[in-house]
């Protein structure tokens, strides 16, 4: 499988996971989600933390997916010419979105728990 398609899948997974946790479909668990001490503190902290993270994580996850799709389909032409190094840009977008989202989720969840 081409790394571009992996990037498409990961961007969609991160975006959907964050969105589902924010709207209450994905409950606190031991496997997936932004699992910090604060976000796991209560159901409200989990949902509000993920809602805060979703403001960054969803658009950047979709951007990473679109970037990967562009690489996979060879559009625009310059992206396919760059090859695998261009995929690192998409990975970087996804990593930055995930880190910033986790920081926002932690801050929001702490505020919920403090009260």
Image (cartoon, rainbow, N blue to C red):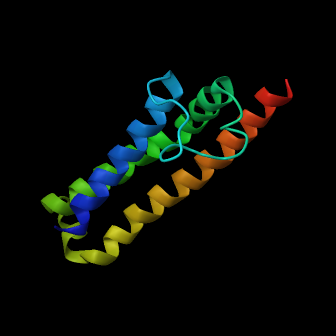
- Image quarter of residue 44: top right
Q: Nearer the viewer, residue 9 or 21?
A: 21
Kindly identify the residue that appears in the image at 62 percent across and 31 percent down: 46
- Please identify the quadrant where the N terminus is shown: bottom left
Left or right: 9 in relation to 56? left
Q: Looking at the picture, how far across and down is residue 32, in whole percent?
A: 48, 45
- Please identify the quadrant where the C terminus is shown: top right
Left or right: 62 in relation to 77? right
Left or right: 67 in relation to 29? left
Left or right: 71 in relation to 104? left
Kindly identify the residue that appears in the image at 22 percent across and 59 percent down: 5
Q: In this view, does 37 lie above or below 64?
A: above
Q: Which residue lies furthest to the right in this view?
A: 114
Q: Looking at the picture, how far across and down is residue 106, in whole percent?
A: 70, 42
Q: Looking at the picture, how far across and down is residue 51, in whole percent?
A: 57, 29
- Image quarter of residue 49: top right
Q: Which of 52 and 33 is in front in this view?
A: 33
Kindly identify the residue that appears in the image at 57 percent across and 34 percent down: 50
Q: Looking at the picture, how far across and down is residue 108, in whole percent?
A: 72, 34
Q: Tag count in the figure?
A: 0
Q: In this view, does 56 lie above or below 95?
A: above
Q: In this view, does 5 lie above or below 57?
A: below
Q: Which residue lies furthest to the front in this view?
A: 30
């Amino acid at each position: 499988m081409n790394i571009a398609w992996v990037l498409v899948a990961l961007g969609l997974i991160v975006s959907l996971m964050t969105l589902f946790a924010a709207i209450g479909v994905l409950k606190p668990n031991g496997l997936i989600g932004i699992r910090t001490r604060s976000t796991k503190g209560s159901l409200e902290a989990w949902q509000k933390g993920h809602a805060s993270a979703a403001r960054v994580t969803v658009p950047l996850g979709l951007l990473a997916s679109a970037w990967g799709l562009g690489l996979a389909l060879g559009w625009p032409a310059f992206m396919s010419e760059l090859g695998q190094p261009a995929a690192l840009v998409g990975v970087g977008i996804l990593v930055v979105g995930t880190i910033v989202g986790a920081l926002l989720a932690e801050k929001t969840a702490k505020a919920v728990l403090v009260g």
